[in-house]
Every structure is written in C-alpha cells, then in structure tokens.
Amino acid sequence: MSFIANHQQKFTDLMFNLENQEQLKKQANGGNSIIFSYPPYEEYLYIQKAKEIYRNKVEFIDISRLFVNFIDQGTWEEFRDYYNDFRSSPHLVFHSDDADIDLFDLIISEIKIACENDRIPFLIRTGCLLGTGIDNVNIMEHPVVMGLAHPLVVFYPSIIENSNLYFLGFKSASNYRCILIY
C-alpha cells in the first residue's frame, strides 16, 4: 500500500499508542517501545510527515548522524583499520561491552537525553544499523529504554511478509518488547 493510502492510519495508531502509554508495557511484553514500520522506499515521506506532526513533542534521533559522529571520534584511517580488524564481528566495533564509547552507547545516550528533556525519542534513519551487529531488540531491551518515562519510537524501514517483519525488506527482525505499527 502506498504512502498516500496508508500513512493516515499509521500516524493515527501511533498517536493513540503515545497517548495511552499505560497499555504499552502490557501489549509489548514488558517493553517500552513502538516499531513504526513503513516501506524502505518511502522513508523520506514518513520522516517528513512525522516532523510535521510531532515537531514540538519529540526528539528526532538520526542514526546516520550518530554513525558519522562515531567514526569522527578518531580519524578515518583509525576507524578503517579498527573495522578491518573486526570485520567478521562488527558488534565488537559498534556494540561492545568495553568502556570505550561506541555507536550503541551514543544511541542510548541520545535516547536518555531526549527523555530527560521530556521529549519522546524517535529513532530515524535506522537503516544505518544494518551490518553493525546492533538489532532493534538490543536497543529496546536496554535498561535505560525499558525504564523511560516516554516510549521509544523506532522508525523502521521494513516489510511484513507472512506475518514476519523484515528490516529493509530482507533481514528478519524481532518485534518482541514492542508494539508494531504497520
């Protein structure tokens, strides 16, 4: 279904869930997140519409910007060499358990700051996570996200086929710990 025919119902559903947060944890298996699914080729349209509707209520957290910020923590050459050393285990670069700040840490920090400023965190440009070892469920199950005063909304370029969610249309994805709007 195209953006023109489908977006009104999706945004109505999103608004309903944001206004009825007390039901969210029950319906989301204890989670505190909403996955807002849309066709990958319509991402720009959905993000623009969300910015139009929610501009004063939410914090748009752009994963592509955080990805660039993560790389810019050092030089391009340092990042390239580090990535090449761990190419077969990208989660060690982007989502490790060590004390160094990685992409995952930057994402969680931005989500926390948004809620501290009484804004609903909306993750956008999440397609940048492909190949990083960071899946939506890693973010949704983080203790900071689970304890937020506002739910996390993940703008998720995906398709649903035979009741299965596919990130960017091909990578199987989890819709556990969240409400799925599709």
Image (spheres, grey):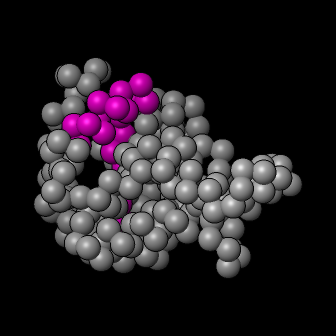
The reply to whether the magenta stretch includes residue 29 is: yes
Residue under the image location 65 percent in, 50 percent down: 132
Q: Position of residue 40 (x, y in %)?
A: 43, 30
* Point 22% across, 28% down: residue: 6
Q: Up-down: is 88 above or below 33?
A: above
> Left or right: 75 with respect to 157?
right
In the image, residue 160 sits, relative to residue 133, either above or below, namely: above
Q: Which residues, given as a range, are shown in magenta? A: 27-50
Please state if 66 lies on the left or on the right of 145 as rendered.
right
Describe residue 156's horizontal placement relative to residue 11 as left or right.
right
Q: Residue at x 48, y 50 (%)?
A: 65
- The residue at the far front in this view is 75
Report the label total. Answer: 0
Name the spot of residue 94 as percent of width and height, x first. 66, 59
Q: Where residue 152 appears, x then y in whole percent? A: 34, 61
| In magenta segment, residue 180 | no
Q: Quadrant of the N terminus?
A: top left
Let me know if residue 26 appears in the view.
Answer: no
Residue 149's place in the image compared with 10, above or below, is below
